[in-house]
């Protein structure tokens, strides 16, 4: 059954759209959309990564303070 399906696909006549698909509005609009999205990602990626680095550094310093407080409380208890 799979052999006949493959044979039918390989031997079926191809259908082509009239005109060139590269010049259609869908393709050109999609290319422009992808270009715009990648431009915005290139702008947003460094900003977001910088903010995340700052956020995690603040969290780490807060965790260090809490650990220090617990450690000192154990020493003197």
Image (cartoon, rainbow, N blue to C red):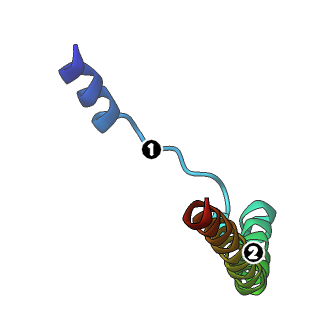
Residue at (29, 37) in percent of width and height: 10
Res 50 visible: yes
Residue 73: percent from the left, percent from the top? 64, 63
From the viewer's perspective, is the residue at label 2 or at label 1 nearer? 2
Q: Earlier in the sequence, mark 2 or mark 1?
A: 1
Return the mark for residue 41: none
Residue 49 horizontal side relative to residue 40, left or right = left
Position of the N terminus, as image quadrant, is top left
Q: In the rendered image, which quarter is residue 77 located in? A: bottom right
Find numbered disc 1 in the image and state the secondary structure of the residue it sits on: loop
Q: Which residue is mark 2?
A: 55
Between 27 and 43, the residue placed more toward the observer is 43
Would you call the spot at circle 1 few (<14 residues within 10 Å), some (14-19), or many (20 or more)? few
Q: Of 15 and 51, which appears nearest the observer?
A: 51
Q: Is residue 15 left or right of residue 9?
A: right
- 26 vs 44: above or below: above
Please, is residue 69 above or below residue 15 in the view?
A: below
For residue 22, above or below residue 11:
below
- Pinpoint residue 50: horizontal percent, then vertical percent: 72, 85
Residue under the image location 34 percent in, 32 percent down: 9
The residue drawn where x is 55% and y is 66% is 75
> On the image, which quarter does residue 61 sit in?
bottom right
Q: Position of residue 64 (x, y in %)?
A: 63, 73
* Extreme residue in the front direction: 77
The image shows residue 24 at horizontal and vertical percentages of: 75, 65
Give the SS element for disc 2.
Answer: helix
């Amino acid at each position: 059954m799979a052999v006949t399906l493959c044979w039918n696909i390989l031997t079926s006549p191809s259908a082509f759209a009239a005109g060139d698909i590269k010049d259609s509005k869908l393709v050109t609009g999609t290319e422009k959309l992808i270009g715009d999205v990648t431009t915005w990602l290139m702008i947003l990626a460094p900003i977001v990564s910088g903010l995340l680095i700052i956020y995690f550094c603040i969290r780490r310093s807060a965790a260090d303070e809490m650990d220090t407080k617990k450690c000192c409380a154990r020493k003197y208890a």
